[in-house]
Amino acid sequence: MGLFSGLIDKFKQGLQRTQELVLAPMGRLLGLKRLDEDQLLELEELLLQADLGVHATDRLMERLRFELKRSSEIDPKAVLKDELLKILQHAPTKPFLADGVQVLLLVGVNGVGKTTTVGKLAAQFKARGEEVLVVAGDTFRAAAIDQLELWGERAGVPVLRNQMGGDPAAVAFDGATRAKAKGIPWVLIDTAGRMHTKDHLMRELDKIRRSLQKVIPEAPQRVLLVLDATTGQNGLQQAEAFKQVAGITDLVLTKLDGSAKGGVVVPILERLKLPIAFVGVGEQVDDLIPFDPEAFVDGLLDV
Amino acid sequence: MFESLTEKLSKAMKSLRGQAKLSEKNIEEALREVRMALLEADVHIQVTKAFLAKVKEKALGSEVLNGLNPSQGFIDIVYQELTAIMGGSAPERPLEFAAKPPTVVMMVGLQGAGKTTTCGKLARYLKKNGNSPILVSADVYRPAAIEQLRVVAKDAGVPSFRTESQDPIVICRAAVAEARLKGWDVVILDTAGRLHLDETLMDELARIKAATTPTEILFVADAMTGQDAVRSAGAFHEKLGITGVILTKTDGDTRGGAAFSIKHVTGQPIKFAGNGEKLDDFERFHPDRMAQRILGMGDVLTLIEQAKDKIDEGEAERMAQRFVKNQFSLEDMLSQMRQVQKLGSMQKIMGMLPGMGQLKQQLETVATDKRMKHLEAILTSMTPAERRNHQLLDGKRKRRVAAGSGRPVHEVNRLLKQYLEMKKMMTQMNDPRFMKRMQAMAGKAGGMPGMPNFPGGSLPF
């Protein structure tokens, strides 16, 4: 992961605006050594505004109240940070190392940034000198394949496609077969956005998995759920449904350069104990960076 | 997933039975439950607070209506208020048209909200209503965005504007000029998704607005958005003065509180909702349904409408006749199952039913789609003669059916038992005394304000 290191500043940069916009009052509250009931309520509201959800917010507030009872002076920021990191670091992500043929499947609801993430990942693997095969598995959305091909051109990686409306499981199968024959270490499969509540579309993911396994029994080694940082509490249902059907191994949190903080990952990670592999903080290729829990929490709590 | 608010409130207000008035003290817990429901539904915390203050004011001292217990009375206030706010100031017509065509409709929003797809849906909707829209892509940034709109336009059966220009303002201005020349009466401008924080791109929108003087500026918003909806919608409104909102991706299980936040912060009407992948999955926004959904009250109206849409009326009529004559056969059971399946997955159907909170979980394990498939397999493994007359099914035939469907014999037996129970129930339903009893029960169990009666007995599933 040498290439990815030293990007924490970039991460913070992405979160910077967020802090200025929303978290100024948080900084003030967290600088206090004692919080009265009104201040606690104000803090609770700020946490809720960060999409942490009722449950995770309750957990954080409980911990704060506990600490307030225990000692006369506390460092609220340190307390919250500690509690948040407990949740976020529960399951650290495994590094993305070339080993045989690694198949990555990207899944998620519509419009979260799957195709863009595939494009960025392909470019980054390629830049560290590893061959990549991109598979255009979104045969549904108009021009999704063209979009991916433009990314492929930019990154200088081949894009395998079949026609629009074709069977994504078939093109995934072809991709795995070709990668195996040519010894290409990375296969990145883009899939159509699908609402997690649609059974028939969710079953299609299972079919893709089965067809991959005919070629490479342990594929897909990683299934990345792409999640939009602006998503609210529905993110939890999304993650649960995709985990159940597609066996997701990692999360990717996109659009963190907006004013949303992606706080919904906290209840998701609390419930599902999944790691976050990458976060998206901008439109450029190198704006997809590894998740850094400390930087994320620091960003949330305004350093 | 969530216990319905109706159930929670019933619990929270149990102690109130017999009290005629709502007071500060006795609604406190209920207000907390509503607050929780709104927050879980992603309604912004400040919006929630403002709303609760309003509800409290209305509820205090209000007489409990005839026939309603306090919790029902309270939830009715909450529901009515939420519906009123979301539907308030909604115009008669969903879209304003310019006095002198072409009418320019500008679509704006964040990346991935669904602008391009929504453009296609809106174009299709307008075409059906007798307009002749043209689609214009002003998204020169996202790879293949222009191509995507071209394909969407083709699917919708409307033209798309072609140009060599890479300047969004030049493109939009040229498109409007061409529409005027060629007689297209509505120009739909698909702008690039952008962050409300990006000043350069927000300025670009303002320049497009100045160059084309749109009649409608519609903010396209993802129904799954969280607390951030307030900030993004607010920023777009401040910069451009949006005239309405289109809510997308409402076909999932999101409670959609963002809709309420957006309405609250912009004051502009939510005009349409996109609810599926197809171009026709697009309808006018129904504030009452959204209110029920945000409050976790299920969505019976939508279910009824879908049932009307997808269920073959002739078939339903024929079936009803057979019920009356007590001729319900396994053949009918199969056909009925298929009708129900047309409505969508069992999970989806149950999500739409109110008061299903706890029941839903139990039902989900029984009436799964997989189980429906099994039942269908068993039924289709029977001969038509067997389906018409279940008494033909002796042990030997049952074993054959089991082998044919790949299910164990006891499942075949269970299905037959269920069939007989249904048949018996239908006989009872024809008995006027039974109907009276049902109505009495429904009266007791009902906590749903503004709910029509479920259409009579056509779906025993």
Image: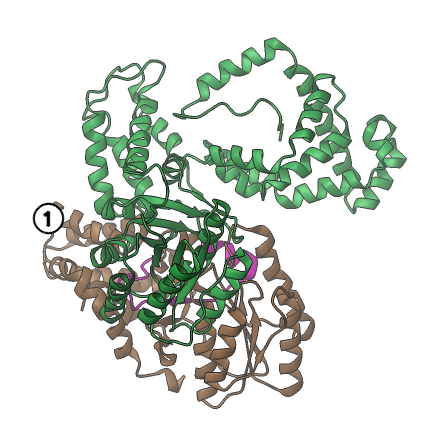
What is the x, y in percent for residue B358?
48, 35
* Residue B239 quadrant: bottom left
* In the image, residue B281 lies in the stretch drawn in magenta: no
Q: Residues within 10 Å of mark 1 (few under 14, many from 20)?
A: few
Residue B291 in view, yes or no: yes
State left or right for residue B439 relative to residue B108: right
Q: Which chain is brown?
A: A
In this rendering, the answer to whether B429 lies above or below B6 is above
Q: Residue placed at 68% from the left, 75% from the top?
A: A215
Residue nearer the viewer, A264 or A167 = A167
State left or right for residue B241 relative to residue B346: left
- What's the amino acid at mark 1? Asp
Figure colour of chain B: green
State left or right for residue B12 relative to residue B306: left
What is the x, y in percent for residue B147?
49, 70
In this rendering, the answer to whether A80 lies above or below A189 is above
* Residue A202 quadrant: bottom right
Point out the image quarter for the C terminus of chain B: top right
In this rendering, the answer to whether B311 lies above or below A140 is above
Residue nearer the viewer, B158 or A269 = B158
Outermost residue toward the bottom in this view: A129
What is the x, y in percent for residue A166?
64, 66
Q: Which residues are magenta?
A: A238-263
What is the x, y in percent for residue A141?
53, 63
Mark 1 highlights which residue? A36
